[in-house]
Image: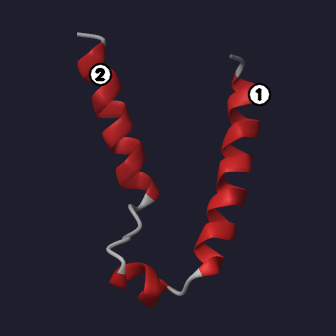
Amino acid sequence: MTLDTLRQLEVHRLELQAELDAAKSKQERNQLGQFATPSRLATAILQQAEHLFTL
């Protein structure tokens, strides 16, 4: 998979996520137990997981 393909997939994922987020208010999502993970934290988690799998 090329870097360009990954970027396109991420753009599409972000668009879908925005649609899902718009379907309910933040309060409604929180009442359902849905809480957003900040992008920087998610990236750090993925980087750590990648590091652990390459040991």
Give the residue at x 36% y 78%. Answer: 32
Query: Badge 1 is on which residue?
Result: 4
- Percent position of residue 15, x then y: 72, 59
| Residue sitting farthest toward the top | 55
User: Residue under circle 2?
Assistant: 51
Q: Residues within 10 Å of mark 2 (few under 14, many from 20)?
A: few
Which comes before the other along the chain, label 2 or label 1?
Answer: 1
Direction from residue 16 to residue 48 in the image, left or right: left
- Disc 1 residue type (three-letter): Asp
Q: How many residues crowd mark 1 within 10 Å: few (<14), some (14–19), many (20+)? A: few
Spatial distance from mark 2 to mark 1, Cα to Cα? 23 Å
Q: Residue at x 41, y 62 (%)?
A: 38
| Residue 28 in picture, x, y percent from top left | 45, 87
Quadrant of residue 14 within the rendered picture: bottom right
Is 28 situated left or right of 3 in this image? left
In which quadrant is the C terminus drawn? top left
